């Protein structure tokens, strides 16, 4: 079985109509596939919001601190933290979790670069498949 190193979900959603921290962070989480029917309490959104706020002070949060802030179990927090880390938004440094970069926008820019690199690799393998099967493809 193939080990998933990184996993990205991107949904194109209608933009929020007003600038509001809660709805904007929720929109980002929803756009990146973190708000699902399984996550009825929007735990991933609440974790990301807490981590973003902690970034303002240059601090990180432990899973226990996050569990106190967002109120689910530590196990639930760790599950969502792993998903946020696989998507490249959050990193673990020592025992604390923080945004990958100094801001959410810088973090999203890094994720964009990774997604583009992943797509380039997928395109290379797709071209190899075409060649092996004898399909014509145009490079463009």
Image (cartoon, grey):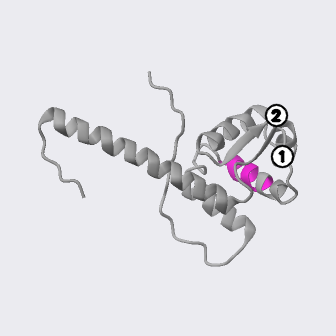
In the depicted structure, whether residue 31 falls above or below residue 62: below
Q: Which residues are magenta?
A: 40-50
Read off the residue under disc 2. 94
Kindly state the secondary structure of the residue where label 2 is placed: loop
Q: Are marks 1 and 2 in contact (CB under 8 Å)?
A: yes
Kindly state the secondary structure of the residue where label 1 is placed: loop
User: Is 88 displayed left or right of 102 in the figure?
Assistant: left
Taking depth in this image into account, of 47 and 36 the one nearest to the observer is 47
Read off the residue under disc 1. 60
Q: Residue furthest top?
A: 1
In the depicted structure, whether residue 119 falls above or below residue 6: below
In the depicted structure, whether residue 49 falls above or below residue 62: below
The number of numbered discs placed on residues in the rendered structure image is 2
In the depicted structure, whether residue 127 falls above or below residue 19: above
Image point 56% across, 72% down: which residue? 15
Image point 24% across, 36% down: which residue? 128
Residue 85 screen position, x and y as percent: 65, 41
Image point 52% across, 53% down: which residue? 113
User: Is 77 displayed left or right of 125 in the figure?
Assistant: right
User: Is 79 displayed left or right of 4 in the figure?
Assistant: right
The label shown at residue 88 is none
Question: Considering the image in quadrants, where does the C terminus appear?
Answer: bottom left
């Amino acid at each position: 079985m193939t080990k998933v190193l990184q996993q990205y979900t991107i949904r194109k959603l209608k933009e929020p109509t007003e600038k509001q921290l809660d709805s904007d962070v929720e929109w980002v989480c929803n756009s990146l596939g973190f708000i699902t029917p399984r996550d009825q309490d929007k735990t991933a959104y609440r974790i990301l919001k807490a981590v973003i706020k902690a970034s303002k002070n240059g601090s990180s949060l432990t899973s226990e601190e996050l569990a106190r802030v967002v109120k689910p179990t530590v196990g639930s927090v760790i599950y969502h933290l792993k998903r946020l880390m696989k998507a490249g938004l959050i990193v673990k440094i020592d025992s604390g979790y923080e945004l990958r970069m100094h801001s959410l926008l810088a973090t999203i820019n890094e994720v964009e670069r990774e997604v583009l690199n992943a797509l380039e690799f997928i395109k290379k393998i797709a071209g190899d498949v075409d060649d092996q099967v004898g399909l014509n493809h145009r490079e463009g």
